[in-house]
Amino acid sequence: MGRLLFLALLLLADAGCHRHRRRYASHRRVDLSLPDASTERDAGPPPSSIPMPPGTDILCFTDVECPGGYCFTSGMEAQYSRVFRDCPDGRAWRATHRVNTCLRAGCQSDAECPPGNRCADVQMLPFPQRACVPATCRTQWDCRRGRLGRCLEYVSGAQCTIGGWACSYPGDACAPQNYARLCPPRPGMIARCVPRNGRFGCVYEPPPAP
């Protein structure tokens, strides 16, 4: 009788240990399922190659509501959707600007930009706001290292790169905005005349993904 009672007590103790281990394991599973705090931190906007012109908190639906500026509408966002998706500068700009808020130009003239920069038009940029961008020349005098050098504006570089200003020379493979010196076409490719190592040359790229 005493031996049976002893065995019964052992079985009850063992069952209690198993319940304790199951409870402990379930707590461990819950703890391990908690998200890592580092994954919840805001990483901020993606890096950009140029300073981002600031946005505003002024709400709008039309340009009339933005004296001295214009309204960043959903239609404008759709127009720039490809570069907002594909290009780091475009993504960085979109991350810091809200739809239906007023935009003001980041600069109006070269005089407002730091040395080595000029005020770019919107067609040079992957976002709808003027900004200061690096420029290798400001005047024709900056292009004297070669005969008949000229400081020319180019609208865009290779895909997802900004436009700007660079020196152009008669011996260059192409010249921006010069229909007599366009890059020879290639089937299924986009030709761009861009500065490379101090000279303008032709770069060929496939069309961007839809």
Image: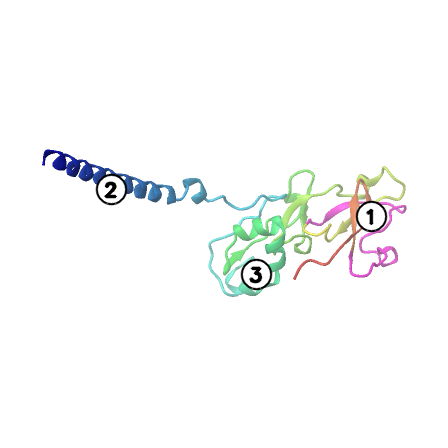
Whether tag 1 and tag 3 are in contact, CB under 8 A, the answer is: no
Residue at (24, 42) in percent of width and height: 19
Q: Which of 101 and 188 is in front in this view?
A: 188
Q: How many marks?
A: 3
Query: Earlier along the polypeptide chain: callout 1 or callout 3?
Result: 3
Give how far across and how far down residue 96 sits, in percent: 52, 50
Residue at (25, 39) in percent of width and height: 20
Q: Mark 2 points at which residue?
A: 19
Disc number lying in front (3 or 2): 2
Question: How packed is label 2: few (under 14 Cα within 10 Å), some, or many (20 or more)?
Answer: few
Q: Name the residue under label 3.
A: 77
Q: Mark 1 points at which residue?
A: 201
Quarter of the figure with residue 127: bottom right
Question: How packed is label 1: few (under 14 Cα within 10 Å), some, or many (20 or more)?
Answer: many
Residue 189 included in the magenta stretch of the image: yes
Question: How packed is label 3: few (under 14 Cα within 10 Å), some, or many (20 or more)?
Answer: some
Query: Which quadrant does the N terminus fall into?
Result: top left
**Colour mapping used in the image:** rainbow
Residue at (83, 51) in percent of width and height: 175
Give the residue type at disc 2.
Answer: Arg
* Mark 1–mark 3 distance (CA, rounded to whole Å): 32 Å
Give me the disc on residue 27: none
Magenta stretch prevailing secondary structure? loop
Whether tag 3 and tag 2 are in contact, CB under 8 A, the answer is: no
Q: Give the range drawn in magenta.
A: 161-190
Give how far across and how far down residue 81 sits, in percent: 60, 59
Residue 164 included in the magenta stretch of the image: yes
Give how far across and how far down residue 205 sits, in percent: 75, 54
Give the residue type at disc 1.
Answer: Gly
Quarter of the figure with residue 181: bottom right
Question: What secondary structure is marked by label 3?
Answer: helix
Quarter of the figure with residue 182: bottom right
